[in-house]
Structures are given as structure tokens and as C-alpha cells.
């Protein structure tokens, strides 16, 4: 997690009041034609909708005469990552509110981060965020950039059940399973998940009354997902056009589809400086045709974007997705329903939100236009309301700085980790992360706490076989707060102290910060233990194009690791990691 806590704006406490939204043309999300109606809201719920309602005398009136009123929009596939646009949590939240999005699924976070992020969101103006626990295969898509603290690896029904059982302790809102090693058609496939393993993972997830979405982009894997009772595909099928028989198999299964056309749209790249193209016109046209086939057959089509990926900005991509669904064959009204009631249904939230009706959550968007006639009018967002509170546009209160603990870094404790806790967690009660290099071919790494000689307590032992590439690396990061969410201030200290020994490879200490920042310094090691100090003044930006000057006020992790020649085995031991 590399998200900035410094740019957030606190949401005002919820006000117990009655609201009346008057004068708008209400598109309620059920398929009923829009009509002028008044909406009454008490606290976070809609209490009445109608043309001739009696408005309570104490109601606060929001006048939207001539405008369009719809349920809040969904984005069922996003990644709140520091490599996206925008890059930090508060700015991402604001981008969705500015686009009328009131509920999103975040597929980026490690389960350790769920609780602190949920707490942080209570201090921010934000849409509702559903956090997904991630499951993949060894070497699979989604397992090629993080350790198993973020993405569990499974390859059999037994390991599938165990993985689901382990992640539900973190209270995920849903499960994402990376089943298809075929990624974007322009790079080698990763490993794929077999049907028995997927079916076991889905069954165990359903035992916990959670929904399963899958990264599946090929027809054959889509059919496997349908047979495995997956709730919805998290992408469109695009390697070829579906046959009528295949469409019927998917329809009969009850599985939905979230096409994420925005991330695959090839036309967007002509305006982007990022040339890592992940789509082409043939695949995209297949995806458009399959969306139309599935929709006309009665398969539920939801709205998601894969925002956070290259050239797929948060918020704006959700609105672009609606236009692409219309291009695929949906009417503007049907596209709006896909972004509201249908998406809510795919998550099992249709009884709580997704339509404008008495008893439903007051998640509401006002547009200047008629988006059910002209889908381009979704770009004219005049107000976004979440839980009965206007957070953007008409009726919203001015943003103020947040003086809560989440607006400023915590003070760093001196001891980072002495590796003595018997439960495998750090001295700070955080979960250590294996930080080997990224990619389908990754360094094989094992980290474990072992006894030191002569009864000197325990130490962290890292063993690795370096991948066959020039940037092979193995390391371990110790988060300074749970999930690396809240940063800490280390300006009271001069540097990092540790005991270390290991293979005579290039060894370094790295300090990670918010929004992808990192600073590093080399250290010399041998097979004998020695105590070293790494002054902050010796740290250099790991990536000069990304990391700004060191301040020490927004630090999230301290990491040690080695880079060795390709294919070489290495080892490293670390103890008594602290600030001095």
C-alpha cells in the first residue's frame, strides 16, 4: 500500500435531517421511464418518491429543476493503486464522486489493509468501497507482482478451500479470482486455474455468502467460470466471438459479465504518452460483439473499468464505459441500468442501493441533461450524494482540512522488528511482506524466523534462488503500520540500525513511502554478523523520476534485500531492526 494520507479531506459528520430533492426528472433505475418527482430522504435512506409529496416543514430543499436524477453509479472493477491516475486515496475518491460514482470495488489491496482503509474512509469524502481478497495460481496473473499476503496462490481444490478460509478472517466484501493466464493478447500467457480448483474456491466463497468475480478474458475460460458458478466475469470475453450455444451456456448459468471495455479501448492510446498498449482493434471488436450477444440473451451486464491501469483514469473511465456499452448495442437507458440496478444485483446489494425507491440508500446523482436519451450527458454531473449527503456539486458543504489522526503521520516507534514474536508478526504487530522482483518469472523466495546461535534470540532468514534476469531481487519489507496504510514520521531519528549477515551480493536497505516513493542505500555484508547504521542522509531515490526529496514525514515500510546474479542462490539474515 503506497497511498498518501496527507492530501485527504475530512467528510463532515452525518447530519440527522430530512432532505427533499425537488423538480428533477427521476430515472429510478428500474426501467420505468423518467418522470418529474420529489425525493424525500431521512438520514441515509429514501423515505418517499412521488410527484405530489407533502414536504415536511423542517426539510432542507435541494432544487434541481430541469435536471436528471438517477441512482448513484457503480464501478465494479477498479485498482486504487499508486501507479494509477490519480495516484493517492483521497484524490481517487474525489475523482469518483466528481463522476457520479457512489460504489466501487477495489481489487488492489492486501487483506491486512482492509481494516485501516475502512477506518481512513470514514475521514474522507468517498464513495462506498468494497474490498476484494485476491486469489490466483502460482505464476498466474495477479500473483506476478505481490506475495501471498496480497494474493493467495492455489492449484487444487484443497488449497482453494484453505485460501478462502484464510482470507475471510479479514472480512472481505467479495473475492476476486484470477483464473485466466491469457492477459491482453500481447504478452505470454501466465498460468491458468483448472476447473476443479475454481469450482472449489467458488463453493467455499459462497459458503460465506460472498460473491466471486473472476479475471477471465477468453471464451473457453469463460465457459469454465460459468460451470464453476462464478457470479460475474470481471472482464469481457475477447479472443473470439461467442457461438449461440456458448451464449446459452453462460445465460443458463446465471453468471453476469462486467466487460471493462474502457481498459481495452484501443482508440484511447493515440492520446496517451504511455505506449504499453494492452489491446488491439480485433480483440476489442470481439469484446463489443460478445457484450451485445450476451446482453440480448439476458445475461446481466454490469459496469467496471479496470481503472488504475494505464490510460484508464479513475472516475472518467466509468463514464467512458457507459458510452462504450452504448457502442456495443445497449441503449443509453440500458447502460444506465447496467451502472445502477444491475451492478448492485451482481454484488447482492439490490436490496440496499441501485434504484431510487423508499427504503433504499440515498446514493443519488444529478446530471445536467438527459443521459437516458444521450449517454454523453453523463459527463455533466451536477451533484453526487452518498448516504443522503451531497459530497460533490449542488448542496455540498465546503471541504475543510482534517485535524484527525488520519491527516497527519503517526510518530514512529524506535523498534521496528526484533523478530521475537511467536505469532510471526513484527514487533509493530504488522505482517511482513516478501518483496521479490516482479513478472511471470520471479525469484523464488522463502523468509522465516529462525533462532540465532548462542541463544541470542531470533533473526529473519531470507533464502532465494534468483530469477534468470538482470534485475533479480529478494527481500522483506516490514510495514510500520498495519497494511502500510498510515504513514509515520521518522524525523525524530537519524537513521536505521540493524544486525545483518549474508551472501556477498549487492545488499541494500530501502525505506518505502507513500504514493510509490522509495529511498535506498547499499550496505556491505559478509557471512559474519555485524551491526550497521544507515543514516537517512545516505538514502538516494530508488527511482529519481518518481521519488521526491527525502523528508522523513510519510514513511510506510523499511525493507532489506539482495540482488544477485541471475540463477544464483542467496541468503540473508537480519535482526534488531530499529531507528536510531
Image (cartoon, rainbow, N blue to C red):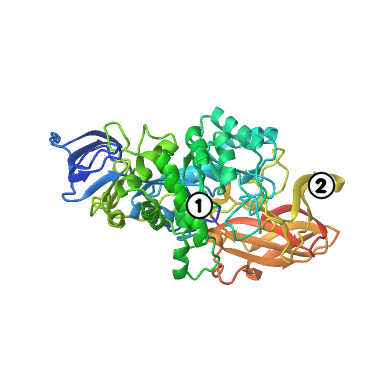
The image quadrant of residue 398 is bottom left
The image quadrant of residue 438 is bottom right
Q: How far apart are labels 1 and 2 at the CA level? A: 43 Å
- Give the residue number, with chain letter if any, for mark 2: 456
Q: Is 59 situated above or below 501? A: above
Q: Is residue 56 left or right of residue 288?
A: left
Q: Is 244 situated above or below 530? A: above
Along the line of sight, the residue nearer the viewer: 83 or 456: 83
Asked if one can make out residue 114 in the rendered structure from this viewpoint, the answer is yes
Q: Is residue 568 left or right of residue 106?
A: right
Q: Which mark is residue 426?
A: none
**Number of the front mark, 1 or 2:** 1
**Image location of residue 447, percent across then percent down:** 75, 48
**Image location of residue 348, percent across then percent down:** 43, 34
Task: Tell me which numbered mark, 1 or 2, is placed earlier along the sequence.
Answer: 1
Asked if one can make out residue 76 in the rendered structure from this viewpoint, the answer is no
Q: Residue at x 55, y 65 (%)?
A: 276
Secondary structure of residue under mark 2? loop
Q: Residues within 10 Å of mark 2 (few under 14, many from 20)?
A: few
Q: Is 22 situated above or below 281? A: above
Along the line of sight, the residue nearer the viewer: 563 or 69: 69
Q: Quadrant of the C terminus?
A: bottom right
Secondary structure of residue under mark 1? loop
**Image location of residue 374, percent across then percent down:** 27, 54
Along the line of sight, the residue nearer the viewer: 433 or 262: 262
Q: Which mark is residue 79?
A: 1
Amino acid at each position: 500500500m503506497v497511498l498518501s494520507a496527507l492530501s485527504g479531506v475530512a467528510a463532515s459528520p452525518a447530519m440527522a435531517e430530512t432532505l427533499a430533492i425537488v423538480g428533477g426528472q427521476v430515472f429510478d433505475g428500474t426501467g420505468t421511464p423518467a418522470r418529474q418527482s420529489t425525493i424525500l430522504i431521512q438520514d441515509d435512506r429514501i423515505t418517499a418518491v412521488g410527484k405530489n409529496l407533502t414536504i415536511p416543514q423542517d426539510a432542507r430543499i435541494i432544487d434541481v429543476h430541469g435536471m436528471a436524477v438517477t441512482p448513484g453509479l457503480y464501478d465494479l472493477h477498479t485498482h486504487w493503486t499508486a501507479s494509477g491516475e490519480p495516484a493517492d486515496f483521497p484524490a481517487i475518491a474525489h475523482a469518483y464522486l466528481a463522476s457520479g460514482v457512489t460504489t466501487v470495488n477495489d481489487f488492489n489491496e492486501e487483506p491486512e489493509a482492509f481494516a485501516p482503509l475502512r477506518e481512513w474512509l470514514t475521514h474522507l469524502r468517498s464513495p462506498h468501497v468494497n474490498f476484494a481478497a485476491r486469489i490466483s495460481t502460482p505464476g498466474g496473473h495477479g500473483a506476478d507482482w505481490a506475495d501471498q499476503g496480497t494474493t493467495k496462490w492455489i492449484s487444487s481444490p484443497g488449497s482453494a478451500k484453505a485460501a478462502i478460509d484464510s482470507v475471510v478472517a479479514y472480512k472481505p466484501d467479495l473475492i476476486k479470482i484470477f483464473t485466466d493466464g491469457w492477459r491482453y493478447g500481447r504478452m505470454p500467457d501466465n498460468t491458468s486455474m483448472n476447473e476443479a480448483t475454481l469450482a472449489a474456491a467458488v463453493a467455499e466463497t459462497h459458503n460465506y455468502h460472498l460473491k466471486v468475480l473472476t479475471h477471465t478474458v477468453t471464451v473457453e475460460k469463460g465457459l469454465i467460470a460459468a460451470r464453476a458458478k462464478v457470479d460475474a466475469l470481471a472482464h469481457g470475453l475477447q479472443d473470439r466471438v461467442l457461438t449461440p450455444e456458448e451464449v446459452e451456456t453462460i445465460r443458463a448459468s446465471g453468471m453476469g459479465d462486467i466487460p471493462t471495455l474502457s481498459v481495452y479501448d484501443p482508440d484511447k492510446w493515440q492520446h496517451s504518452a504511455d505506449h504499453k498498449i494492452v489491446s488491439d482493434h480485433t480483440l476489442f471488436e470481439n469484446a463489443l460483439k460478445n457484450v451485445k450477444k450476451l446482453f440480448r440473451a439476458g445475461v446481466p451486464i454490469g459496469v467496471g473499468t479496470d481503472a488504475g491501469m494505464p490510460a484508464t483514469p479513475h472516475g472518467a473511465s466509468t463514464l467512458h464505459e457507459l458510452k462504450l456499452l452504448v457502442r456495443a448495442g445497449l441503449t443509453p437507458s440500458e447502460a444506465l441500468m447496467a451502472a445502477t440496478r444491475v451492478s448492485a444485483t451482481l454484488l447482492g446489494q439490490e436490496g440496499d442501493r441501485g434504484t431510487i425507491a423508499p427504503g433504499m440508500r440515498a446514493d443519488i446523482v444529478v446530471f445536467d441533461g438527459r443521459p437516458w436519451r444521450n449517454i454523453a450527458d453523463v459527463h455533466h454531473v451536477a451533484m453526487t450524494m452518498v448516504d443522503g449527503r451531497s459530497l460533490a456539486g449542488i448542496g455540498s458543504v465546503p471541504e475543510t482540512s482534517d485535524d484527525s489522526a488520519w491527516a497527519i503521520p503517526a510518530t514512529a516507534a524506535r523498534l521496528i522488528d526484533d523478530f521475537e514474536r511467536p505469532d510471526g508478526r513484527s514487533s509493530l504487530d504488522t505482517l511482513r511482506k516478501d518483496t521479490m522482483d516482479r513478472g511471470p518469472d520471479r525469484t523464488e523466495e522463502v523468509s522465516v524466523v529462525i533462532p540465532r546461535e548462542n541463544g541470542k534470540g531470533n533473526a529473519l532468514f531470507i533464502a532465494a534462488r534468483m530469477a534468470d534476469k538482470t534485475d533479480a531481487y529478494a527481500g522483506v519489507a516490514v510495514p510500520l503500520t498495519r497494511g502500510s496504510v498510515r504513514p509515520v514520521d521518522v524525523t525524530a531519528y537519524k537513521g536505521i540500525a540493524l544486525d545483518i549477515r549474508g551472501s556477498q551480493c549487492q545488499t541494500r536497505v530501502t525505506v518505502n513511502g507513500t504514493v510509490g516513493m522509495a529511498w535506498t542505500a547499499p550496505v556491505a555484508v559478509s557471512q559474519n554478523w555485524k551491526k550497521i547504521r544507515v543514516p537517512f542522509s545516505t538514502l538516494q531515490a530508488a527511482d529519481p523520476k518518481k521519488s521526491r526529496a527525502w523528508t522523513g514525514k510519510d514513511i510506510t515500510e523499511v525493507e532489506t534485500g539482495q540482488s544477485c546474479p541471475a540463477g544464483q542462490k542467496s541468503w540473508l539474515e537480519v535482526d534488531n531492526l530499529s531507528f536510531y
